[in-house]
Image (cartoon, grey):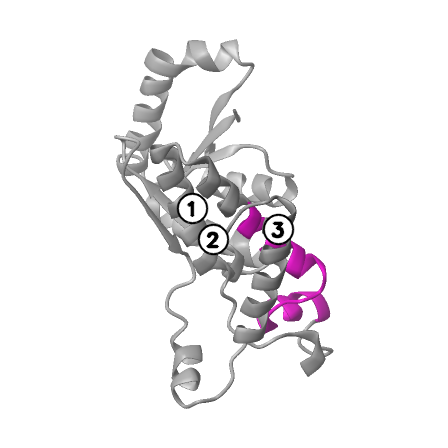
Amino acid sequence: KLPMYLSTKNTILKQYDGQFKEIFELLYEECYKRDFEKEGLTYEHRLIDDMVAFVIKSEGDFLWACKNYDGDVQSDILAQGFGSLGLMTSVLVCPDGITIEAEAAHGTVTRHFREHQKGNPTSTNPVASIYAWIRGLQHRAKLDKNEQLTSFCDLLEKSIIKCIESGKMTKDLALCVHGSKNIKKDDFMQTEEFIDEIKIKLDKLMEQNEIKS
């Protein structure tokens, strides 16, 4: 349960963005205000430039409602500014609460794939793709009430975090840690090596939690 902000530029795009502001305020007042106040939560509209500054200096813990373009741009800025696009996943949720689409947010990484086709080693971060599968499987587990699948998803995510926290990572993350001028080959792993390390961590966690593969 989080406070919510909507960001637009209704001072310039008076009609288009103004519609978003008005519709959100109307829905909030008519449908959600009482529930928000009951939980001690707030809703506020902010101009997009003011909101961006607020987000950068904040520590999170709020829901940010954006128009499609704003959300697409700002989510990538936040992902890269606080880590890597390779750590971010995207989930689209239908109003029915049943249908979702989970995907990696970084695109197809064409340059890396071309190197892979040539037989050259790459240090491509697989985390966002794995996270997308985790989100999909978590939703499947929720629909099926499958606790074992839920546990597997949780442990897979933990195994990835443990890998990175232990210093085992792909090149994009190593660049964030060491910088482009100081990075060495030993600071990062190739794609397959990193995936193998995740599996080692996952197997240990599953054994500790007595979950069969």
Q: Nearer the viewer, residue 143 or 68?
A: 143
* Residue 82 in view, yes or no: no
* Rendering coords of residue 112 (x, y %): 44, 78
Residue 180 occupies which quadrant of the picture?
Answer: bottom right
- At x 60%, y 38%, the residue is 60
Q: Secondary structure at mark 2?
A: helix
Marks 3 and 1, how far apart at CA: 22 Å
Between discs 3 and 1, the one toward the N terminus: 1
Q: Which residue is mark 2?
A: 131
Marks 1 and 2, how far apart at CA: 6 Å
Residue 117 occupies which quadrant of the picture?
Answer: bottom left
- At x 48%, y 88%, the residue is 120
Q: Secondary structure at mark 3?
A: helix
Mark 2 is surrounded, within 10 Å at the Cα level, by few (under 14), some (14 to 19) or many (20 or more) other residues, namely many
Question: Bounds of the magenta span?
Answer: 155-178
Q: Residue 135, labelled with which disc? A: 1
* Rendering coords of residue 64 (x, y %): 47, 36
The amino acid type of the residue labelled 3 equals Glu
Q: Which residue is mark 3?
A: 207
Q: Is residue 185 left or right of residue 37?
A: right
The amino acid type of the residue labelled 1 equals Arg
User: Disc 1, disc 2: CB below 8 Å?
Assistant: yes
Secondary structure mostly seen in the magenta stretch: helix
